[in-house]
Image (cartoon, rainbow, N blue to C red):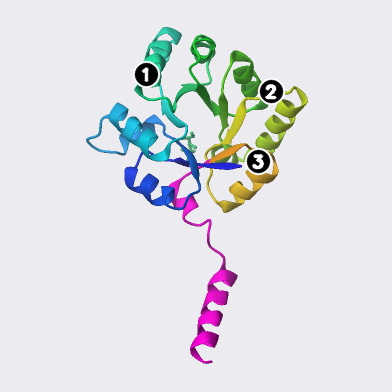
Amino acid sequence: MKYFIDTANMDEIKEIHQWGVLSGVTTNPSLVAKEKDISFHDRLVEICELVGGPVSGEVIALDAEGMIEEGRELAKLHEHIIVKIPMTEDGMKAVKVLSEEGIKTNVTLIFNTVQALTAARAGATYVSPFIGRLDDIGLDGLQLIEDIAAIFAIHEIDTEIIAASIRNAGHMHGAAVRGADIATIPYKVIKTLTQHPLTDKGIEQFLNDWNNK
Ligand code: E4P
């Protein structure tokens, strides 16, 4: 499972990029809105240049024509741009057209297996099932990852699964063992991924022993 970071914040991306674990970045309109006084397009280009891997930028239009137009504009910005499209009927029309033009897409707001299969059949490069938001309403987000991975394997579908709406390291473990290709992870969760109390205890003990030798 590869790691993407789910943010539009340059400081967060730069910091985690230094760890060497980042393969890409996802943004969404809410994350971009948190960044004050930026140009969305300029920020996407800046992220692409730094990370050198797939960077998802979401369209705002809800009609197919508008999504296609925005998608083409976004794709022109940089070779690493992935056009993020919501899972709707118009979204599927846009994915079909954009994928036929060689533009990569990430279909977002996926909450069941048939949405994922439909997006894949329309030509999506990636699908983004939202684990945390399903858990929030008492459903099992990780089961969805397992089911989509099984369906894609049975039917030899090469659309990649991005486990999204990750809330904690447990989601990371669960998505990895269930076959997600990628997890897109908020900065706060990435910062927990090196941590274990026995690691801290071990470091303390090693230093104590070294200093008392
Ligand atoms: C995915 O690409 C989304 O940006 C993201 O994972 C949404 O997560 P949230 O439920 O924490 O907003």
Viewer-nearest of labels 3 and 2?
A: 2
Tell whether position 188 is magenta.
yes
Tell whether position 197 is magenta.
yes
Please give the name of the residue rendered at 50% of the width and 82% of the height, measured from the top-left corner. Answer: 207
Please give the name of the residue rendered at 57% of the width and 41% of the height, measured from the top-left corner. Answer: 2
Label 2 residue SS: loop
Residue 173 position in % (x across, y down): 64, 49
Label 1 residue SS: helix
Q: Say which residue label 3 marks.
A: 142
Viewer-nearest of labels 3 and 1?
A: 1
Residue type at mark 2 is Ile
Residue 10 position in % (x across, y down): 33, 43
Q: CA distance from mark 3 to mark 1?
A: 35 Å
Apparent side of residue 18 relative to residue 97 in the rendered image (left or right): left
Q: Say which residue label 2 marks.
A: 157
Q: Are marks 2 and 1 in contact (CB under 8 Å)?
A: no
Between residue 67 and residue 21, name the one nearer to us: 21
- Mark 3, other Cα within 10 Å: few <14 / some 14–19 / many ≥20: many
Between residue 141 and residue 92, name the one nearer to us: 92
Mark 3 close to ligand 1, CB under 8 Å: no
